[in-house]
Image (spheres, grey):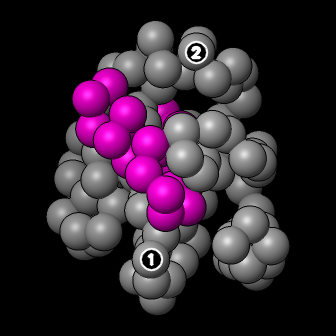
Amino acid sequence: MQIKQLVINKMAQIKELTSNEFSKLISNDNLGVVDFYAEWCMPCLMMAPVFEGIAEKTKNIDFGKVNIEESEKLAKEYNVSSIPCLIFFKSGKEVDRIIGSVSEEIIEDKINNLR
């Protein structure tokens, strides 16, 4: 629980999303990136600082996190079967996803291609 709090408190740009907040984030015209994760997942913990770094330096993109254990319905709705799973949304639709722990460069390239 402390790791989760550290991550969320450190990066105000990354919101821990409930179902309502999730809907708001993905439905606007900005590109949105949602990290589906679990607190016990070691690759998720390794990915957290990468995700934070991108959120800190990237403008005009909405970033959020969904704990799959607290929001099982969202995880099922978006067919999240492996974590970490970054899903990219625009205007309410999934436009791409990255599964697994990847480098900051890979995520930045994906964002630049989707803008």
Q: Which residue is mark 2?
A: 77
Quadrant holding the C terminus: bottom right
Q: Is 77 situated above or below 55?
A: above
Say which of marks 2 and 1 sits in front.
Answer: 1
**Residues packed near mark 1 inside 10 Å, few (<14), some (14 to 19) or many (20 plus):** few
Q: Is residue 20 magenta?
A: yes
Amino acid residing under circle 1: Asn
Q: Position of residue 80 (x, y in %)?
A: 66, 25
Indicate the amino acid at tag 2: Glu
Identify the residue at image location x=38%, y=47%. Answer: 25
Is 105 drawn above or below residue 8 in the view shown?
below
- Looking at the rendered structure, the secondary structure element under dot 1 is loop
Q: Looking at the image, can residue 77 be seen? A: yes
Magenta-span inclusion, residue 18: no
Q: Is residue 82 left or right of residue 47?
A: right
Residue at image position (30%, 69%) is: 13
Q: In the depicted view, which residue is nearer to us: 50 or 71? A: 71
Q: From this view, report whether residue 103 is shown above or below residue 69.
A: below
Residue in the picture at 55% in, 61% down: 31
At x 39%, y 20%, the residue is 71
Q: Position of residue 26 (x, y in %)?
A: 47, 44
Q: State the residue in front, 35 or 44.
A: 35
Residue underneath mark 1: 60
Please indicate whether residue 70 sits to the left or right of residue 86 in the image. left
In x, y percent, where is residue 17? 31, 39
* Quarter occupied by the N terminus: top left
**How far apart are labels 2 and 1 at the CA level?**
26 Å
In this view, 41 is above or below 96? above
Name the quadrant containing residue 107.
Answer: bottom right
Answer with the quarter of the image where residue 81 lies: top right
* Magenta residues, start to end: 19-40
